[in-house]
Image (cartoon, helix red, strand yellow):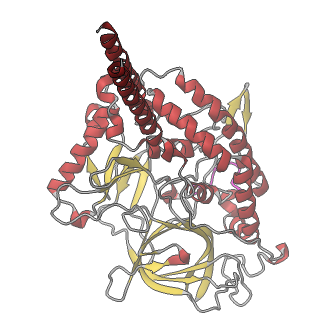
Amino acid sequence: MDLKRGTIIFFAVASCVVVVLSVILYFTDHDDVVVQRSADYYEMLSDDVPDSDALGAISEDFTTDIESFESNLPLVVLELDSELPEYKTFVGEEEIVYEDVDPWTTGTISLYENSDGYNRLTDEAAETSTINIKKRGHTSINFDKAQYYIKLTDENGEENPLDVFGMGADDSWILNGSMADKSMIRNYLAYRVSAQIMEYAPRCTFCEMFTFENGEYVYQGVYLMTESVKRSENRVNIDESKKGETYTSYLVRRDRYTSFDTMLDTYARLTGANDEWIGVKYPGESKQSEANLAYIQEDFSNIEKVLMSDNETVFKTYTRYIDSDTFADYFLINEYFGNYDAGEHSTYMYKNSGETLKIGPVWDFDQAMNNSVYDETDPNSLAMQEKAFFSNLVKDTEFVNLLKTRYAYLRENYLNDTYIFSIIEETKTYLESARQREWYRWAEDYLDEEGVVPGSYALGDYEKEGVTISRYNDSYDQEIYNIKTYLSIHGEVIESELTSLLEDCTVTTGLKGEMVLIFIITCCLFVVPSILINRK
């Protein structure tokens, strides 16, 4: 009798241990969905310059009286050694590069940022550096208001990393002046919020930019000084690739074809599963070799094969290849802000040596939040589930449940009206004088009601119930209202729409199937020995 009791107790304890370990394993696999990241953003103070003084120092030709100009934003001055060349254009989706044109020119950049928060062109610059500079962008490269890619250089033409506006030392920076976004806040808002959520999101700082031409400071408007997406300890922090190394960490981007990156022929393109290209951003050209490029192409293709597989057994192994949590965050951030270029264009992914593929950082929100040139964005539906990789991932019950769990957390903490609107209002009051100067500088483009200015960004009209509705907007406050309205409506419906996605799931991965198996084993451990002992 004691032997029977002892045997039963042994198997009962063993069964409990199996169950407890299973539960621990299950929740350990999911508890990192509530991890939040720190961000290098600080509250911006309200602009206290009277409205009547906002334009006082800017003349009709946009030259500036430097003795009277003052801004609560940091200032950037570009002095170029020659005009910026037009080195490419786009016809539809096709990039046309002028092969005989060097896209770069040289010059000097001066940065002004005083500790008291008031910045003047008569002050001593906080930093000055020689630069290499070129225009950048896809659609935006044809806008009247240019965007720039800047490489800081020293006297020998080598990299000159500087801590620009407190964002960490680096030599590569982007001056993002999105003509598509009359509010000027779409990228800032999305990057600032994403920095609280993701492992890394680009840091950026508002500034007002001038060019120095023929002895005059010419006002060019409000810009975001933004980190470029690159491998760095301060940015995408993956292992540095060693020259000659085959099995390397890497950073890639899904986008349109460009001759400025090394393009890969991955499985998705070769099979027609996805028409966009995968371009290698890291390792850079100096560290690329036939061997490591072949490795990246094969490794990324293997991931595509798993994610796009029709074989359920193969597809269910995808968690061995990708970091599902980063994919969930990327999906939810871009979905919340209605950034539906994401997933197809400007979609970055990176893989550290020996780890799974992560997606991010997020990028380019100037046409998000109901600002697409083509049509109104419906706030009552989702679209990220139609994008590459995600159209496969949402077949899995576990991934959709991960989206639901993560969104509930983000909705409570970040992606809600109270938090988002507070950032919008803070930004709006900070930009009060600067946005008046911006709209004055680019009035010809912003007030282009007929859409006839070639370098402007004009939203197309749309049809509703047989009526043509104009999307033209000549009011900054209305632009802010449009953003808030879209986010408020869309943020509310995401939860129910994610629940609807569950109805179309056809696969269940993760540990739930394993839990069933563990339960069966547990039963066998406890029941079978009991039956054998009782028979004896």
491 is higher (above) or lower (below) than 365:
above
Front residue of 333/90: it is 333
Residue 100: image quadrant is bottom left
Q: How many marks?
A: 0
- Picture coordinates of residue 397, whole percent (x, y): 47, 27
**Residue 52 placement (x, y as % from top left):** 84, 75
Farthest residue in the top direction?
A: 535
Residue drawn at (41%, 23%) of the image: 507
Per the picture, the main secondary structure of the magenta-coloured stretch is loop
Magenta stretch holds residue 383: no
Nearest the camera: 517 or 330?
517
Q: Nearer the viewer, residue 185 or 438?
A: 185
Residue 370, can we see it?
no
Q: Is residue 350 above or below residue 133?
A: above
Quadrant of image for the C terminus: top left
Quadrant into which the N terminus falls: top left
Residue 132 x/y as whole percent = 39, 76
Q: Is residue 104 visible?
A: yes
x 52%, y 66%: residue = 226
Q: Is residue 34 left or right of residue 525?
A: right
Magenta span has 450?
Answer: yes
Q: Which region is colored magenta?
A: 447-456
- For the point 56% across and 77% down, which residue is it? 165
Q: Is 259 left, or right, of 406 in this rendering? A: left
Residue 479 % position (x, y)? 73, 52
Which of the 4 image quadrants contains residue 476?
A: bottom right
From this view, report whether residue 296 is shown above or below residue 388. Answer: below
Q: Residue at x 62, y 55 (%)?
A: 186
